[in-house]
Amino acid sequence: MQIFDSHAHYNDEKFEMDREETIKKVYEAGVKKLICAGYSLDSSIEAVKIANKHDNIYATAGISPNDIPVFENENVDVKDFFFEDIMNEQLKKIKQLVEKNHQIVAIGEIGLDYYWNKENKKEQKLAFINQIKLANELDLPIVIHTREAVMDTIDILKNQINVKNKGVFHCCPLNIELIREALKLGFYISFAGPITFKNSKNATEVINLVPLDKMLVETDSPYLSPEPKRGTRNDSSNIIYTIQKIAEVKNMSAEEVAQITYNNAIKIFKINVNWCISTDDVLLFYITRLRVILPFFLFVEINFNIFSCFWIINFK
């Protein structure tokens, strides 16, 4: 079974004490590839560091709506000036990070979140649009975070800016209207632990609504652990429960769902699997070649020794 966790946060402080051990555990559980998602400048830098240590981990870079600059007790003009100045500087650094690191496969997570902050809607929208522009410039897809901001998110994507390489609605809210509009616009829908929750009333309807060729799976680790792990720290080994839920609804095997979503992630994030060679694969390549070449050199050496002996015996 090939599994691709399309969104996790191993750059989160909750993994600080056992990050490498957890990643090893995840590989052993059958997760072949995963994306470590950035949500701020610092977390994007950390995501790249993690990706560069592991052959099958990739990164995203971006600033989420919950991590954009916030200014309190400032008048409107001053706030707008400082916000744009700081955001432009951060996006400049995000761009430099992408240009220097081929392991970054998307701009994200970016978007709108009115659950945590309704007072800075204007700034959230501006940051979202500017990062879409950056993604278009860098020829990358986007990873969208949206919460309680369905209408504004869709309005931006439909009417305000074209998204060149489309992207993914990560941990997509189970909102029928949002998913319909997202699919019409050509986006992928990524499902996480919430579809397994017992109080998730329309999970079955939503899963059936999304075609298999537009579906991804993720964990959003260390958050949103699926049933029966709910309430514990999440990691990518738990993604199997999300896969099993989709398989149950779609009347398929878990292996089929895993393979389809794996292939979809490879496609949307433009991952060249021909170049995704692990250190072990490289070692095996050279060992195999040595097994072919070594007998030839042994043959030459043996024949050279025989010839040398013959020459010594007959000509000395």
Image (cartoon, rainbow, N blue to C red):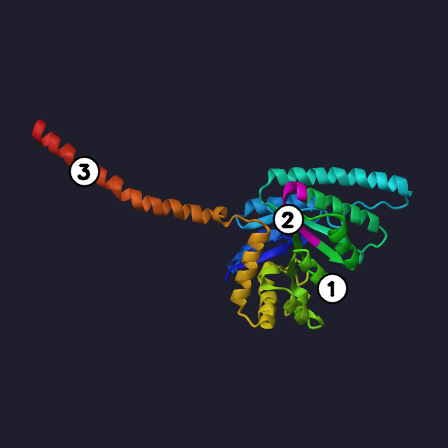
The picture places residue 170, in percent across and down from the top left corner, at: 67, 57
Q: Amino acid at mark 2?
A: Asn
Asked if residue 283 shows in the view, the reply is yes
| Stretch in magenta | 136-144
Q: Quadrant of the C terminus?
A: top left
Measuring from the top left, give residue 309's x and y in whole percent: 13, 34
Query: Which secondary structure lies at badge 3?
Result: helix
Q: Residue flagged by tag 1: what amino acid is it?
A: Glu
Indicate left or right for 109 with 5 as reference. right
Q: Which mark is residue 165?
A: 2
- Tell me which residue sits at (57%, 60%) in the image: 261
Badge 3 amino acid: Asn
Say if the magenta span includes residue 106. Answer: no
Q: Earlier in the sequence, mark 3 or mark 2?
A: 2
N-terminal of the pair, mark 3 or mark 1, is: 1
Q: Position of residue 171 (x, y in %)?
A: 68, 59
**How far apart, in angstroms, are the residues tagged by discs 3 and 2?**
61 Å
SS at badge 2:
loop
| Residue under pointer 1 | 177
Of residues 16 and 5, the one drawn nearer to the viewer in this rendering: 5
Sequence-earlier tag: 2 or 1: 2
Q: CB of mark 2 within 8 Å of CB of mark 1?
A: no
The residue positioned 34% from the left and 45% from the top of the image is 289
What residue is at 44 percent from the left and 49 percent from the top? Answer: 281
Q: Residue furthest top?
A: 316
Instruction: Point out which mark residue 303 bears.
Output: 3
* Residues at discs 3 and 1 in contact (Cβ within 8 Å): no
Residue neighbourhood size for the residue with mark 1, other residues' Cα within 10 Å, grouped as few (<14), some (14–19), many (≥20): few
Where's residue 35, x and y in %? 60, 52
Q: Between label 3 and label 2, give the one nearer the viewer.
A: 2
